[in-house]
Image (tube, helix red, strand yellow):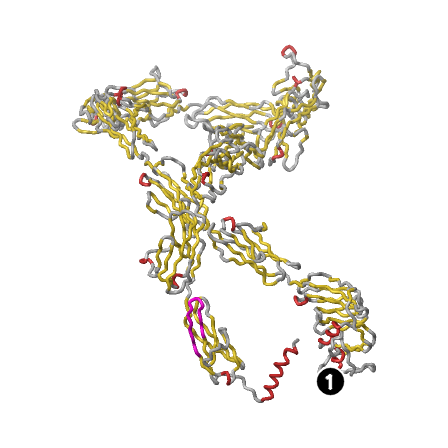
Amino acid sequence: MTVRWHDDVDLGEGICIMNTGNCSVIQHILTDVKAGSREYPQILFITARFKVSERILRSLMESPVVFILFLATLTFTDLAHSQTIYASKNPVAVGSSVTLSSNVTSGGWLFNGRLIVITLNETYDISSTWEDRVTLNTNTSSLTINPVTLKDSGSYVLENLVDGSFSQLTLLVEEPVSNVTVQTNKINLVEFNDTAVLMCSVSKGTSSFYQWFNGSSMITANEHLQLSSGNSILTIRNVTRYDQGPYKCNVSNNVSNDISAPVNLNINYGPSNAKMTVMPVSSIYKGGSNITLSCSADSSPPAMITWMIDGVYQTNTSSIELRDATESKSGNYTCLIQNTVTLRFSSKTTAIQIVDPVTAVAVNLSHPASLGETFSLSCEVTGAVDIIFWWRNGEILISADNNNTAFSPDNKTLTITSAQHSDGGNYQCQAFNAVSNQTSHRFTVTVYYGPEIANVMGPNLAKAGDYATFTCNATSNPPSRYEWYFGNDLVSNKSEYVTQSLTTSMSGKYLCVAFNSISGKNSTADIILTVVEPLQNIIVEAPMMPAEEGYSYNLTCNTDVPADYIYWMKNEEPLNQNNKIVFYNDNKTLHIRMVERYDNAKYECIAINAVSKNMSTPYMLFVNYGPETPFVYGPAFAETGHQAVFNCSAESVPPSTFYWWFNGSIVANTSNYTTDVLSLSMSGEYKCMAINNVTGKNSTNSTTLTVIEAIESVMIKNTTIPIDTKNFTLTCKVVGPYDTIYWMKDNMMLNMDPSNDSHISYYIENNMLHFIPVTTYNDGIYQCVASNKAGQQNSQQYRLLVNYPIQNVKLNGPVTSVKEGYAYNLTCNVTGPADYIYWMKNGQRLHEDNRTFFHKDNQTVEINPVKRYDTGSYYCLAINAAGTMSSALYMLVVIYPIENVEVKAPMTPAIEGYSYNLTCNVTGPAEYIYWMKNGEKLHDDNRTVFYMENKMLHLSMVERYDNGNYCCMAINAFGNMTSPTYNLIVNYGPEKPIIYGPAFAEIGRQAVFSCSAMSVPPSQFFWWFNGSIVSNTSVYTTSLLSSNMSREYTCMAINNVTGKNSTNSTTLTVVEAIESVMIKNKTIPIDTKNFTLTCEVVGPYDTIYWMKDNMMLSMDPSNNSYVSYATENNMLHFTPVTLDSDGTYQCVATNKAGDHVSPQYRLWVNYGPLGLTISRASMFMYVSLTCQADSRPACDFSWFFDNQSTPLQNTPSIVFPATSQNFGIYTCKAWNSVTNITMYQNLNVTAHAPAIHFPYQGSLMMMVLFAFSAPVLFN
């Protein structure tokens, strides 16, 4: 360090400050500097004249960082206020920055009297204590502190070195609030019994302000909610179920705020508002029914529900289900509702009556009923029965209706005397009880009689090989049994007897016997049968030689069995004897004299006997003859270049063989002969010869042919268009020589005689046909014919269509509707000539494209494939020279898949007892619509009707059971689509309300009643008391009860949709309240000492019982070997109390309104100290001893050394240097201030314990110096 001295300074001059008599501050400073006893890192020499206060000088002296020597004359002045300090923010948060501003350029900043910085014009120096956090703006002398700490709160002074004035500012530094937490004395509380204490704390923050919130609502103090400790503690007295939270604590100060995480309280309450529900609701239940009983109550935690039937415990469930219930399940059902935490109880009871239904009814007959005798019927019933009715053939039987009918006293037996035919029939009995009735199946009673005289039917004559069927009948009831006999043999035991295949040996008498197994009577009858063999094989036989014309011929009829008669047929006609036909050998032989060709025919013989008639296979008789003179067919003239065809035929059997000759040579060996292509040289005679190879005869004939020049072609021409009433000419063009021309119309020669046809308006000129004029009558097919000697040649047909106005146009189609994607044709039928046909759709002409095609001169249009947009109005337009005509419109409907289906309902709701409609809206063509409910198809009945082609579903007088999911399905040829379901809700009710609520309640408390009623929509509820409405909700909580509030409470349920209402009432009795229950004690519980808890109850009560750790305290020593307590009136005595008695205790006071549980009392049994021990540890140059003991509450510890009476230290642990003077016996004393028990424990500490070793004495001295210097170094 270098010090510069100014010449004007006299280090020896003393200065007195403020006339105090103290040595001058300056002198002390200079003396310290000169002597070198204090070191200053920096010395600033000031040569100007200033006014310096004592405050600055004192601060300078105390600061080891900066020291200032005033080299000019110093003038000490009093301080005067003349400046103002401004803070950028005040208060300011810890860790942020703050700027203090003023307009002083030369002066000193002080904090709580200690110098921060001194500045002269633009020169300044900052104390080392502040230099890392303070900056000075020399232009404004503003001081910035960054960051600020809590220690920076205080008074800041700025002193002007020029005029000695000063200004002062108090700066407040606050720590931001953080980590706000809420703790509770306990989370689990009991409604009305416990008090909740919520404590709000912060880990950091100063000058805090506390606010509490329940949910989003700020809490204000009242009798129930109390705030204390600067609002940091919230106390909720006698908590209710509505105090569960969430609770949040908001802590704020001038610089910040923070809010805690939400805390919820678990409020245990109930059971309250207990209710029992029985479904279904009924006064008497039918056996086999399913009955559900359920109990519920408002409770937290959920209540434990125990069921009793007629006082007998059953099960712990919230509900009981009686499946297929029987009469044995009848009884009083009680549910006991217990909250195991609040230890409160409630119960509900209802009576269930079950009657088993009649399950079986049957009719039995005593014995078979016989005509004129007595019989009885009995009605057998399974199940209880109250009354029985009898029915016959659907009509009820009454004994007064018939003298022969009688009933037993209980109607179970029906007796009929002297049975008649009319007493037969279908009998039923019907049994009734309170829950059911059942009718037996029909029991048919038959009145037996007979048999009467037997009657036999069957054949007297039969054909061998056939089966004979005989039937026997005798009137009888039951039907007779039958037996058939042939000879002495039994052949059948049925009324109908069919024989085996008959033979002639089975001819004879057949006997039938009929008998009644019940009456024991019988009757007989017989029949005679004769069996005859049938005719089967009949043949017509002929001689080996063929029949030849002019010679006789025989045919013979042969049979396999004798025939009674034979006759002959020719060509399926009977053949009779004449001068040519003769029969021999009983008609077996047919003799034909001098057969002729006309005798050719089919011959058959028919044989007959008693059982059969049969015909032979036809025999074809052929008579051979000829040939006769041949017939020659062929032209007399033929044209060159053509061919001539000749045909030769001759009568002959068998057919003749033919040969043709021309110019002496055979030119063909067939009956037909076709020449080669003709030339003029082929004129001449052509001869035919016929030869019969059987008769050996032949015959000839001939014809002459002349060949002439040919006509090559004939054609009709015209030069104008034929129009009705206009002249028109046809011309016949002929190539080649011809003799004549004539005209034909419609394959007939044209009539040229006006006398035969009034429509003739034409004439012929040479080869032309003139129409003067042409008319529609002249329409037809015309040909002109040119002829020569060889024949004639026709022109091609010429179709003459005289144009005239079209008379009719009709459009035809297969069907008026077609499925999309298929082909479809329309045909235009035109009456009258049409030159052209056009097709139109919706007034626009159709043209061919990739789907539209025209056929048959546009007569047919084909659309392939059809699209939905092809739907429209079609017509065809026919055109000719006389005009146009269109068909009528033809509407084509294209069927395509349905796109959307939905069910629409009216705006008004469905109400039970009123009609309701649903409508099926379909997008797309629908051919049929049907409706479904819950997946099942709906059908017409007395309440369900369909309208508008099933589009509308009409429900007449809807019922609640009509609730369900309705949908409609639309169908067309493409398929079907189903709408989304429409959930129909039928509004009904309300039924009679069911009320749940207490029968008893306490004065000063509130009663809660709940009302429910079957209703759709849910009803609105009103509660009435003393003729006034007290609530408009289903749950009614009374005001605080008084004794005059015992009375009837009425609930009215109103359905705002149906407009109906219904009421029910319950009675409440208000009793004196138990105001409080509290556990008190007068002594401190100490292990093995007697101890008593007292249950103090304010208000009348019936009983008291105790609970420990939320369970009822067992008073039975057999269940707990540790039981050492007993109850006496309202006291619980522990004899003695032990550590096993630790726990949470409550006492419960009960009255008719319920249980009242005290707040929890935490019993902690005090004991100890026990097991006192001393533990030892060594560290560096020190020894540590720690004393421990098991004790409640914690012990007080004291340490003694070498049996001294004064304790070294009153702490559990002691630490001392490991030096020889500290070696010795250390004694630990443990004392429990509650049990007043003291224990001692000794430990001998010797030199063998580890200690620090110092090598020489100088080091120890340095350590001591360091210890004394530390406070100065760290100031």
- Magenta residues, dominant SS class: strand
Residue 1266 placed where, x, y %? 62, 82
Position of residue 625 measured from the top left corner of the image (x, y, whole percent):
42, 23
Q: Is residue 52 something one can see in this rendering?
A: yes
Q: Nearer the viewer, residue 310 or 158?
A: 158
On the picture, is 201 further left or further right than 601? right
Residue 606 position by quadrant:
top left
Q: Is residue 371 visible?
A: no
Q: In this view, does 529 lie above or below 92?
A: above
Residue highlighted by disc 1: 35
Q: Which of 274 and 212 is in front in this view?
A: 212
* Quadrant housing the C terminus: bottom right
Quadrant of the snapshot with the N terminus: bottom right
Camera-side residue: 621 or 197? 197
Relative to 1115, is 112 on the left or the right? Answer: right
Give the x, y percent position of residue 1254.
56, 87
> What's drawn in magenta, residue-wise?
1229-1242
Q: In this view, does 314 lie above or below 888?
A: below
1235 in magenta: yes
Q: How crowded is mark 1: few (under 14 residues within 10 Å), some or many (20 or more)?
A: few
Q: Does 846 appear above or below 805?
A: below
Q: Does the magenta stretch include residue 580?
A: no
Q: On the picture, is 136 further left or further right than 1211?
A: right
The quadrant holding residue 1066 is top left
- Residue found at the far top of this picture: 755
Considering every residue shown, the one lying at the far bottom of the view is 1256
> What is the count of numbered marks?
1
